[in-house]
Image (tube, coloured by chain):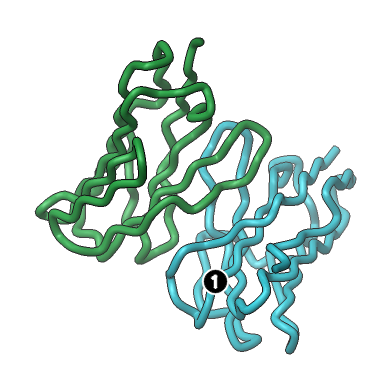
């Protein structure tokens, strides 16, 4: 199936620093979803990207879908301790989740 | 507005036993998907039910089966449990058999000893 890879696997940042996670596919994606899972919690839907080159913002979060629709990124500006968790991308065509990027924020 | 509810929250079973997990979708949703999440990993898609039929299936053996009822609730059954089946089982609901945003329940933590 169409796998998606995510980098980095882990990211430790100081509160206030920026954070970016990348999602990559070897094949073109019809759409991609991003989810956040807090420690001990369940995945929570953040956004869906469908169009080539699409950019969407949610407060301090910026989501991008690559022009070739093979990659996507999630950028968080000025991280806060509430941003702690694992961020997953999902290939919306075949229900495949990436392995996730675990973010820890040091106060 | 009721969210996705799953029961039980925790379960301990012995190898070889069978287990049934239950899920009620978010109010207004008619599609249920099941995922297995091992510790430290991303959710792995098991299958999706829509209109009481299995519509899509991931790479899981036939020991994993499911059912959807007329009220859209769903069950996940796992037979002949293996130690490797220990995981968090997540149910997610959506609308119209589509791949729109998934709303996840809190999951059932299954431990096989």
Seen as rendered, the residue at the extreme left is A67
Location of residue A96 by image quarter = bottom left
Pick the residue in front: B83 or A33: A33
What color was chain A assigned in the picture?
A: green
Q: Check the picture and name the quadrant holding the C terminus of chain B.
A: top right
Pick the residue in front: A46 or A92: A46
| Residue that numbered label 1 is attached to | B94
Task: From the viewer's perspective, tell me whether residue B50 is left or right of residue A106.
Answer: right
Residue A31: percent from left, percent from top: 29, 62
Residue in the picture at 52% in, 31% down: A85
Chain letter of mark 1 equals B
As drawn, B17 above or below A15? below
Q: Check the picture and name the quadrant holding the N terminus of chain B.
A: bottom right
Q: Tell me the element at label 1.
A: strand
As drawn, A96 above or below B112? below
Residue in the picture at 19% in, 63% down: A51
Total marks placed? 1
Pick the residue in front: B15 or B37: B37
Location of residue B10 by image quarter = top right
Residue A46: percent from left, percent from top: 44, 50
Crowding around mark 1 (Cα neighbors within 10 Å: few <14, some 14 to 19, many 20+) is many
Task: From the viewer's perspective, tell me whether residue B84 is left or right of residue A83.
Answer: right
Task: From the viewer's perspective, tell me whether residue B13 is left or right of residue A50.
Answer: right
Residue in the picture at 75% in, 85% down: B71
Seen as rendered, the residue at the extreme front is A59
Residue B55: percent from left, percent from top: 52, 79
Residue B101: percent from left, percent from top: 46, 63
> Which chain did the renderer colour cyan?
B
Residue in the picture at 35% in, 59% down: A48
Task: From the viewer's perspective, tell me whether residue A82 is left or right of residue B34.
Answer: left
């Amino acid at each position: 199936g169409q796998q998606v890879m995510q980098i980095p696997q882990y990211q430790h940042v100081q509160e206030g620093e920026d954070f970016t996670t990348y999602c990559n596919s070897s094949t073109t994606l019809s759409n991609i979803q991003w989810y956040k899972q807090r420690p001990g919690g369940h995945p929570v839907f953040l956004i869906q990207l469908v169009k080539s080159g699409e950019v969407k913002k949610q407060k301090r979060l910026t989501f991008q879908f690559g022009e070739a629709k093979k990659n996507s990124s999630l950028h968080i500006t000025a991280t806060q301790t509430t941003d702690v968790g694992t961020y997953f991308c999902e290939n919306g065509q075949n229900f495949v989740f990436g392995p996730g990027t675990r973010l820890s924020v040091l106060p | 507005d009721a969210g996705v509810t799953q029961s039980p929250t925790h379960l301990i079973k012995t190898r070889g036993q069978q287990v049934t997990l239950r899920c009620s979708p978010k109010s207004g949703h008619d599609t249920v998907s099941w995922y297995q999440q091992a510790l430290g990993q991303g959710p792995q898609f098991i299958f999706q039910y829509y209109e009481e039929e299995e519509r899509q299936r991931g790479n899981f053996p036939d020991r994993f089966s499911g059912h959807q009822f007329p009220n859209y609730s769903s069950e996940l059954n796992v037979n002949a449990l293996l130690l490797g089946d220990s995981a968090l089982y997540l149910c997610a609901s959506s609308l119209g058999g589509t791949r729109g945003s998934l709303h996840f329940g809190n999951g059932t933590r299954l431990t096989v000893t």
